[in-house]
Image (spheres, rainbow, N blue to C red):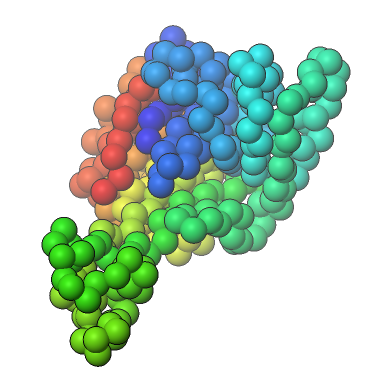
Amino acid sequence: MTILGSGAAIPTLLRNCTAQYITVQNKHILIDCGEGTQLQMRKFGVKIQRISIVLISHLHGDHFFGLVGLISTMRLLGRDKNLTIIGTKGLKTIILSQLQIGYVVLDFEIEFIELTGKDSILVYEDNAIQIHSFPLKHKIPTSGFRIQEKTKERALKKDAMLHPDMKIEHIHRLKRGEDVVADSGVVLQSTVFTKKAKKSLSYAYCSDTAYSENVIKAVEGTNVLYHEATFLEEHISNAKKTMHSTAKQAATVAAKAEVGQLLMGHLSARYDDGAEHEAEAREVFENSVFVNDGDVFLVK
């Protein structure tokens, strides 16, 4: 994952508005798309045309104002591959109206999947991953997202095909953990010819939200959790007023949900950097990091 923007509502010279680029199982996913996101993609070497899924958490401008410009650039670059956009109800109308008013005619289809921001639902699935949305606690309908790899197949051992009774058609069943009876009557055991599958990984994304116990269940056990931490605890009154979180609150969610690592972002422009947020969070959850634009993380 690449952090394209780690700031809050007002972009600064060091932090752009929220956006993240995720690569998982050959899927390229953009999460949120604040103003200037496509410039950040060029700056940090992200390939615009590879994006197949866009997830928009809510309709505050710093999370989607860059989307119509990005779509227009995709057209100018000759895109013909369809795009899936998943976001709050109303996003489809906004994007299609802007494209129409700007006389932009696309050579690819956009599939819009609209969310209420009130339910925990499966919003995308293929043979390798699932994406669930879940409600966050903000001023307007807002969704978090959990990207989960499906259970992986066992790996075939290098010398498995040397067995005289092994056939190509046996491989898939063995990798699924099944034993196979060969034509000769010999039983080919999955545990003998395959190795344990690599563990399936998960990533949860919580954009703008006040502290919520309901979020804990939705992100429970994820390898990496991104949770906004706009303010320090000394400014908790601001967090309550704007329905955002402090670093301590983000760390509390991480600790209760027993995640592997906490990444924090959405830094208020009142702070120079996230060093104090990081220190505050580590008092509650040690494996906490405040992200910066351009940071790259491997979920493991």
When the figure is inspected, residue 127 is found, relative to residue 266, above or below; the finding is below
Q: How many marks?
A: 0
Instruction: Residue 206: tell me if it is visible.
Output: yes
Which of the two residues, 293 or 138, is positioned nearer the viewer here? 293
Instruction: Residue 134: tell me if it is visible.
Output: no
Q: Residue furthest bottom?
A: 185
When the figure is inspected, residue 251 is found, relative to residue 75, above or below; the finding is below
Which of the two residues, 186 or 151, is positioned nearer the viewer here? 186
Q: Quadrant of the N terminus?
A: top left
The residue shown at (44%, 9%) is 13
Left or right? Give the position of 260 relative to 163. right
Q: Residue 199's image quarter? A: bottom left
Q: Position of residue 142 (x, y in %)?
A: 62, 46
Q: Position of residue 287 (x, y in %)?
A: 22, 45
Q: Position of residue 258 (x, y in %)?
A: 30, 60
Which of the two residues, 280 or 85, is positioned nearer the viewer here? 85
Q: Residue 21's image quarter? A: top left
Q: Residue furthest top?
A: 13
The residue shown at (38%, 54%) is 202
Left or right? Give the position of 145 relative to 160. right
Which of the two residues, 92 or 16, is positioned nearer the viewer here? 92
Q: Position of residue 97 (x, y in %)?
A: 83, 27
When the figure is inspected, residue 228 is found, relative to residue 97, above or below; the finding is below
The residue shown at (57%, 28%) is 33
The residue shown at (41%, 39%) is 23
Left or right? Give the position of 105 relative to 133. right
